[in-house]
Amino acid sequence: MRLIDLYPTRGAFAPGEPIELAAEIETPAPASAAIRLSVFHLASLIDERTIPVALGAGRQRIALDWQPPPIAPRGYGADVELIVADQASATASTAFDVLNHWTQAPRYGFLCDFTPGRNNAPETLDELARFHINGVQFYDWQYRHDQPLSPSDEFTDPLGRRLSLATVRTLIESAHRRAVAAMPYTAVYAASPEFHRAHPDWGLYHVDGRPLQFADGFLFYMNPTPDSRWSRRLLDQYTALLRALDFDGIHIDQYGDPIAARDAAGRVVQLDRAFPAFVDSVVERIKPLHPHASVVFNCVGNWPVETVARSRVDFMYIEVWKPHTQWRDLWRLITDAQRMSGKPVVLAAYIDPARELNVRLADAIIFASGGGHMELGERDGLLADPYFPKYGLLSDRLRATLRAYYDFAVRYEDVLALATRDVTDEWAERVTIDGVPIGLQHAHDAVWPIVREGAGFTAISLINLAGLAGGDWTEALSGAPLALESIVVRLRADRPIQTAWFASPDGDSPRAQPVDLQKRGGEVVVEVPGLHWWALLVLKWE
């Protein structure tokens, strides 16, 4: 008898909604057994129950329901034991969260296959829900950049792909059945050459009067200032697509260059001001149609993050490019955007899934920083390129690793992300580890403490770069960090600590374990069981 898997059936759950988990069990013959379900909030066991099950031969899915308290947002952990003949024969863990809206803790994925007759939408969204993906970007689903909705159900896009609105609708419906928001990709200033020829006075131009082009004339740039004729038309297109298709908002892209341009009359258009103004006009337009709609804008290369942070975007979305290629840049991009906006942050940092070690370390840093990573989509897909259809495929090993990391980020999101702030710099001189270089000032070959704080607690994520030869996340790692066993962490605490606990996604169980605190002089000493990639130490203050 095997306990194969445990997972939630939805990307997230709404307040008052019962939680449904699925346990997959395989048995060679009919048998009687029981499942012991334990539900945790952080380090606290809040419910435990034993559920008798009658199993038939073969593989089957057992539904496990649980009613959470009416508190949101909040993350939970769930552990199960398969009990046979009064003995625990197998265990498994997962996580889930309760959110008022998916953008409170966005876990953004992607879909990019809209071919006619696609028939695996339920299976695709089931798999994404197992990773707790609660929003998906429908990338390049549209007929034309200047006219997203096609006049016919089946159509050919500008790159020659055959697409179908029926497939788009099926994917939206499958997403909604699993509490996953469906967000349509759009571009803020992109138009076809034909549209630009018909409306040259709507375009953007170089200082010498040449029209701005993208990809050698594949697309032309239009003027996105909110009062321009192009922007008014694009807002009308958004209205039309939200009336025709049950999308949950608008995802708005840009290309990162230029920073400024000229309109047809030669006037300077400052795009860092035009973009957030356009975002706000989109919010004003679509909220009456869809009160819970979300608006997301792509800050390509972290630009213009300062002005977009003051707009009405629901969360910050940053596509990461040079010069932000150091491991510590991933932390810095997230925490700077959090500080400026007061909102969640998602990074689109593209890493080939063949570089499994890079993916794992990047996610440890991103999740420890309270951020999300746009990377997962389709069936076992992981983004390796800004053109999403060029995604790579997860190996079985990397899939298992990422399931554990996404589970861990959701299980402990109350101390990693929700209502927390980064205090890493404040703790830079207050955390040391015996015999190990420490601190974000080290590019590599060190342990990094990424520290976040909330009401009554401090969460110290220890990120292991011991033994790594370089600090660039775009360069393939040649090996895993040096595993550190039973490390001694010294803390200079400025107030009394009531309790402390430790957890890691890298071991046999993600369950929080209490740790002993010893006072030695002006320090508090904690012995952490081990550090492979990412370990979390949480201090609860008196």
Image (spheres, helix red, strand yellow):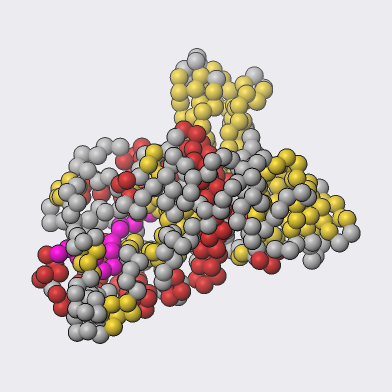
The vertical placement of 409 against 542, above or below, is above
- Determine the residue positioned at 56% across, 53% down: 471
Instruction: Give percent across and percent down for residue 53.
Output: 54, 26
For residue 236, which quarter of the picture? bottom left
Position of 413 relative to 20 (above/below)? below
Residue at the limit of the structure toward the top, as seen here: 29
**Residue at x 64%, y 45% (from the top left corner):** 467
Where is residue 391? Give x, y as percent. 35, 45
Query: Can residue 47 be seen here?
Result: no
Chain part drawn in magenta: 178-193
x, y percent for residue 17: 49, 50
- Tell which residue pokes out farthest to the left in this image: 198
In magenta segment, residue 184: yes
Image point (50%, 15%), residue name: 28
Q: Quadrant of the C terminus?
A: bottom right
Is 86 drawn above or below residue 525 in the view shown? above
Residue 85 x, y percent position in the rendering = 64, 19
Residue 498 appears left or right of 89: right
Depth check: 459 or 485 in front? 485
Front-most of residues 60 and 368 = 368
